[in-house]
Each structure stands twice: as structure tokens, then as C-alpha cells.
Image: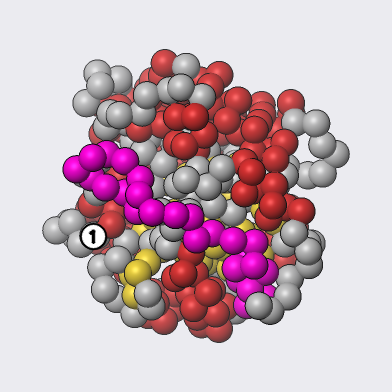
Amino acid sequence: MTSDFADALACGRPLVLDGGMSNQLESAGHDLSDGLWSARLLVEQPEAITDAHLAYFEAGADVAITSSYQATFEGFARRGIGRQRASGLLALSVELARDAARRARTARPLWVAASAGPYGAMLADGSEYRGRYGLSAGELERFHRPRLEVLAAARPDVLALETVPDTEEAAALLRAVRGLGVPAWLSYTVVGDRTRAGQPLEDAFALAADAEDVIAVGVNCCAPEDVAGAVETAARVTGKPVVAYPNSGEAWDAETRSWRGRSSFTVARVRGWRASGARLVGGCCRVGPGTITSIASSSAPAST
């Protein structure tokens, strides 16, 4: 699919994604401990989301990923929010990122990726790290399509089909995104050389190889150690630009509701990912503006 973003991705310099929306909001003092996660602030304090996007743009990010990861009609309905208002909130997520781009003090082109998280994100129980929800491909497609239609109508530069845990949901998303007129990237959450559900990454990436609407493939919300092999596999199997935005490498302790361990996300790793075909690199959970600045200011891609 041809678009300004696709052209920039294919022909320009490698692009820098933002970091974790949730940790940036939490660092500003916002409580995200409910089922809507960062999408709650679309309802209660949208200006905080704009500020978070702006922090990443000014840190050097070229692309902002919207706060719609966990924003769904079903999730909003549980909060008493009807379908019409929910549509408006989904569109607002794109508008807030655009507003941040307008306010950013830079002359470089800035882009907006509309996030569409997996079905498991709506459940808010960690299911996106297991997949295989017991739903048919048709049911998953019917879940995703209406939200993707609303996000596409808000005219982002690209749709981010992200944190996908298995090939069944990926196949449903690839059908759901057809004909929307906005390009998409597809990124899996992985462990080692397999999806979270245990399927080989070669098979997972092969699903998108001939998908005209998908302009990039890759991984996100995984350990930095798992990125290099996935980038190489995605580039080899699909021939498409690769997107990579892992977590910091710290581990979440569900019992204490806290992070433990140390970050293993380094600029040296980023250089290796770029050398293997990554054209979009940023961070997910626990990766903040400081790390994005380091990525943006790093030297040209080179093997490590």
C-alpha cells in the first residue's frame, strides 16, 4: 500500500518510535490501576495523554503510538459508556497525538500510529500474553473490525496491530484491516523464537508476507534479548521493513504489583536490530523518554 508513511519507512532514514505510554503517565502521577488502563484518561484527563506524547516527540521520537491499546467498545461499555461516545474517544486518541505533533518544537516530520491491541487487552487479565482465547477467527475479526474502522476514519498515518500473541488472532486482524485505506504494521509479542502461544515465528510472519495492507512486521512487548532473532526472521520471511519495540527487560511481579530486575535495553542492541532490518525502533513498557533520546541520537546502524 502506498502512503506518505510507507514511503518514509521504505526510503528515508530509520524511524524512532516512542516509549511506554503507561509508564510516562504514571511518572506524571496518574493512577492507571483499572481495566481501561491508559485509555481511562481519554475519558477523565485527555490533556495528560497529549503531554505524554509531547514528551516523547521532544525526546526524539518520530512516531507516537496512540492511547487506544486497551480502548474498546466492550471495555467502555463496562464503564457505562455507549457506542457513540466510545467511537468519539477512539477518534480522540488520534487527535491527541496529532495535537502533540503540532506542539512539538521540531521541523522533522512526525507521524501517528493508532494502536489496536489484541482481544486479551480488553479482558485486562493478562490474556494477551497467552492468546488462544477460545474464540473462532470470525469472532475475533468481528471484535476487531469496528474499532479499526473508527480508528482508520480518524486518519492516522498507520494502524499499529500490536502485542499479538498468536497466529489465530493475527490472521483475524489481517482480514479485519483489509480495505480501510490506512496502512498497518503487525507486531507479535514473543518468547524466544515463538509467539506467546508457542507458534514458530517463521509461520507467524509468513501470514503477513503477501498482505498488501501491512507495510511492516515485527515484535513488541517482549524482552530485548528476544528481538534480534525475531527481526532477522521477519525480514527474511516477509521482505518488509521490520518494527521492534520491546520492554525494558525488567520483569513484572503480579503479587507485589511492582517491577523487578534491571533494564537490558541498550543502544548497542538497537544498532544490531537496525543492521538486521529494523526500520522502526522504540520501546514499550518501562522504556521512557531518556532511552528514546539515546535511540534517536545513536549512530548509524552497525552490527554489534
Residue 95 placement (x, y as % from top left): 59, 28
In this picture, residue 65 sits left or right of residue 44:
right
Find disc 1 in the rendering and name its residue. Answer: 130
**In this view of the protein, can residue 241 be seen by the observer?**
no
In this picture, residue 75 sits left or right of residue 86:
left
Crowdedness near tag 1: few (<14), some (14–19) or many (≥20) residues, C-alpha within 10 Å: some
Image quarter where the N terminus lies is: bottom right
* Farthest-out residue, right: 107
Residue 162 placement (x, y as % from top left): 44, 54
Name the residue at 72% across, 66% down. Answer: 10
247 lies above or below 76 = below
* Farthest-out residue, front: 261
207 lies above or below 23 = below
Name the residue at 23% across, 45% down. Answer: 254
Q: Secondary structure at mark 1?
A: loop
Which contiguous range is marked in magenta? 251-277
In the image, what residue type sits under mark 1? Arg
